[in-house]
């Protein structure tokens, strides 16, 4: 990792952390340039070991699943998820007159994804552990989803400077996109088609 990437890695994570805490100055830690935005997709590589751990854990819990097929489908879905939302956000940003903030927003969003995954992994492991009460799993999953939506809400409001309606629309698109990709990947991993 070159020194510039290391510096951007630290600034990006700090920007995402401060934004999570509601500090509007957090986003100013990243330049908002398109070049830095492109480099922020390095966050996908930073998060990849965690995602592979989740894939492995989920695969262990599944019976009669082709492990290689599942891994390939999940990795393709992972890449699709990292690529699809920035494109959707680009269109929304243009429509709401915030295109000049899109690169900064996506830069912080990408690094925020690392923080979200860091929270999601232990929750997933806890929910799927044999000693965890099944009745609490749904509640904990819902609480985690609400926390993630709240984080994304704050991110869009502080960094993209979107109105509440615009923020709600953007988050709804993000959720729909995530659910569509996840549904497609489950169908393909199970051996189904479209």
Image (spheres, rainbow, N blue to C red):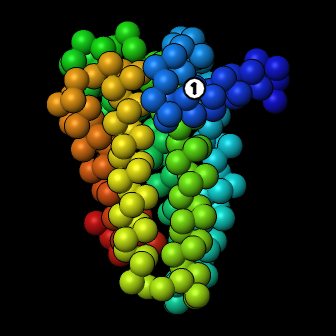
Image point 26% across, 26% down: which residue? Answer: 92
Q: Quarter holding the C terminus? A: bottom left
Q: Is residue 87 visible?
A: no
Image point 21% across, 36% down: which residue? Answer: 169
Q: Nearer the viewer, residue 108 or 183?
A: 108
Residue 128 drawn at (x, y percent): 54, 79
Q: Is residue 75 left or right of residue 77?
A: right
Look at the numbered disc 1 and give the secondary structure of its residue: helix
Residue 149 drawn at (x, y percent): 35, 46
Q: Is residue 175 left or right of residue 78?
A: left
Image vertical order of residue 60 relative to residue 149, above or below = below
Image point 49% across, 35% down: which residue? Answer: 20
Image point 48% across, 85% down: which residue? Answer: 133
Q: Is residue 52 left or right of residue 2?
A: left
Image vertical order of residue 1 relative to residue 175, above or below = above
Residue 67: image quadrant is bottom right
Q: Quarter holding the N terminus? A: top right
Q: Is residue 184 left or right of residue 164?
A: right
Residue 42: image quadrant is top right
Q: Which residue is mark 1?
A: 15
Residue 56 drawn at (x, y percent): 63, 71
Q: Is residue 30 visible?
A: yes
């Amino acid at each position: 990792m070159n020194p510039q990437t290391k510096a951007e890695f630290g600034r990006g994570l700090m920007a995402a952390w401060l934004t999570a805490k509601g500090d509007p100055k957090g986003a100013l830690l990243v330049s908002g340039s398109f070049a830095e935005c492109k480099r922020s997709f390095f966050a996908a590589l930073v998060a990849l070991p965690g995602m592979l751990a989740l894939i492995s854990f989920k695969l262990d819990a599944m019976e009669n699943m082709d492990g290689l097929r599942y891994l390939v489908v999940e990795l393709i879905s992972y890449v699709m998820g990292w690529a699809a939302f920035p494109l959707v956000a680009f269109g929304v940003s243009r429509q709401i007159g915030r295109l000049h903030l899109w690169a900064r927003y996506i830069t912080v969003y990408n690094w925020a994804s690392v923080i979200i995954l860091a929270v999601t992994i232990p929750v997933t492991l806890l929910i799927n552990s044999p000693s965890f009460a099944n009745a609490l799993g749904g509640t904990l999953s819902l609480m985690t989803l609400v926390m993630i939506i709240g984080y994304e809400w704050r991110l869009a409001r502080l960094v993209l400077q979107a109105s509440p309606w615009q923020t709600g629309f953007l988050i709804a698109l993000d959720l729909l996109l995530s659910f569509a990709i996840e549904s497609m990947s489950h169908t393909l991993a199970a051996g189904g088609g479209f």
